[in-house]
Amino acid sequence: MSAPNGSAPVLRVDGLDVFYGGIQALRGVSLDVRKGELVTLIGCNGAGKSTTLKTVSGMLKPKAGKVVFQEQPIEGRPSHDIVRRGLALCPEGRRIFPNLTVDENLDLGAYIRSDRAEIRSDRDKMRGLFPILAERAKQLAGTLSGGEQQMLAIARALMSRPKLLMLDEPSLGLAPKLVEQIFQVLANLKREHVTILLVEQNARQALQVADRGYVLETGRIVKDGPARALADDPDVRKAYLGG
Amino acid sequence: MADFFNFLLNGLSIGSIYALIAVGYTMVYGIIKLINFAHGEFYMFGAFVGYTALMFAFGVPASGGEPGYLPLLAAILVAGVATAVLAVIVERLCYRPLRNAGRIVALLSALGVSLFLQNLGQQTVSANYRKFPPTIADSRFPRSEVPLDSIQPGDIFSRNVILTYAVIAEDGRPQQRSATVALAGEPVEAGQLAQARALAQNSALEAHAYSYARVTINNKQALIVVTLLLVAAGLYLLVQHTRFGRAMRAVSVDFEAAQLMGVPVDRIISGTFFIGAFVAGLGGVLAGGMYYERIDPLMGLMPGLKAFVAAVLGGIGSIPGAILGALILGMSEKMVEAYVSSGLRDAFAFGILIAVLLVKPSGILGRFEGEKV
């Protein structure tokens, strides 16, 4: 729980209760992310990982609890306003715009910005990071393969120059080789000091790349700590790392 | 054969009227999957605003002369903006609160708005037809002027020669009339010529005799077609090459993901209603007002339904599809009217709707968008 430095966290989630109709999905979830950290939230299917990210990004309204981003309360704000404050979510299932070209998808990622020259240079940067996006620039995004779409989704989220990037299951449904590639990208982003909150079912890989981690079970945080410590924890090993 | 092309041009202009309404239908459907049955009433509302503007603000000159293009253009713009504002209010009050209530609920709300606006119109401005004030003079072209003085009795022309003149109508304003001077292939009669010269002499406006080409287009019809071309080009640029258009396309496939990009979805939807209704409103002034010169609170019903058929035919959600569908509908409807039976015209149009829904529900340019997971 102790922070690597004494500064206020970029994101602080405090006692979040979220319901889907009458069913409670989150029970008092609290976590924080500090500048430059890569924090991962692991857990099984249905544990509430995506719900947590959706609530932070404004797609769901919490019944109770606080979400503080850069010392401003943001719970209950509309998503488009939250993005403007510097919090980007790369959603589960990629959700790229299939009827738009790759370049147009990237431009939409920069929708909140108006600095044209900077946007162009960021687009070139993304093409450096993901060469496939340069090759397919004018192609409709719907024609890309699953892995390519995931690269596009991450690049699109980065185009808003987020102060915190949240990724929801970026490796889901991808071939092992592509999973490797995605985690390589995350490691690169971390080296560039991008602050990241990563939700993953692939706990082994996630804990390898993360600084710290939280374990979510049926809507509750049951464990947290440095990623290495979690990876060595016998309970975590048994439940999520196959023994 | 000339008749065929005349019918085709006529159908083209009627199709253009449908198209001006259909683009709004299809844009709204594209973005929120709502069939906005009140869209025909936006067309009606536009015509009434244009009427009011011409009658009370931009003034029809009482002293003589047609008002001309400038007052018409001003009336079109005022009507477009007023209709757009009405549409934004309707969306805000009647559709937005129902956005998560299911598509049938929103559809019923749209039907309600449609009936409400029709009845509101009947209660406030009466259900009777009113004559739209004159806008621009009627003419057809290509044509060439035949100086009346040069015509001698016994001359033979290969085309009909028609005199255009004007009389002062009951309301004190000049009204356009026409009279035949010579029939194609027949020698000019002295009596008819003398009569034409007398009419020209007493004409309230300058009189002209013209011989017309076999295939002609009316200037008002041409204006409607040209307006459609401008609207189509404008919409293309807007949708394909602006930030707003990009956001619109994004919202149309995945509004949650668009929101995650910082796109203010509500504002984009309002903007879509604004643009679609702007086009319908100006269509109301051009078609119901300038062209047919008759407006009433139910005038939006039939064109609205036809535009809906056109949008479905072209592939609802697609703007080029709506325009293509409208032109096909207008022209084929005209052919049915000309060569089969005018009574079957509307039945034919709605037969198209049923046929499309049975055979190819996605329409000509519509795509069934499967999702790649």
Image (cartoon, coloured by chain):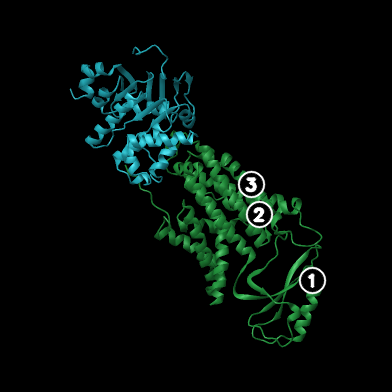
What colour has chain B? green
Q: Position of residue A4 (x, y in %)?
A: 34, 13
Rounded to the nearest whole Å, what is the CA distance between mark 2 and mark 1?
31 Å
Viewer-nearest residue: A174 or B198 = B198
Does residue A7 lie above or below B116 as drawn?
above
Give the residue at mark 3: B81
The mark closer to the camera, 2 or 3, is 3
- Amino acid carrying label 1: it is Ser
N-term-proximal mark, 2 vs 1: 2
- Write the residue at 70% across / 58% down: B128
Rounded to the nearest whole Å, what is the CA distance between mark 1 and mark 3?
38 Å
- Amino acid carrying label 3: it is Val
- Amino acid carrying label 2: it is Ala
**Pointer 1 chain:** B
Q: Is there any visible trace of residue B48 in the rendered image?
A: no
Rounded to the nearest whole Å, what is the CA distance between mark 2 and mark 3?
12 Å
Does residue A54 lie above or below B323 as drawn?
above
| Crowdedness near tag 2: few (<14), some (14–19) or many (≥20) residues, C-alpha within 10 Å | many
Q: Position of residue A74 (x, y in %)?
A: 47, 23
| Crowdedness near tag 3: few (<14), some (14–19) or many (≥20) residues, C-alpha within 10 Å | many
Give the residue at mark 2: B47
Give the residue at mark 1: B203
Which chain does cyan denote in the image? A
Q: Could you tell whether A79 is left or right of A213 in the image?
A: right
Q: Position of residue B213 (x, y in %)?
A: 61, 75
- Write the residue at 33% across / 22% down: A38
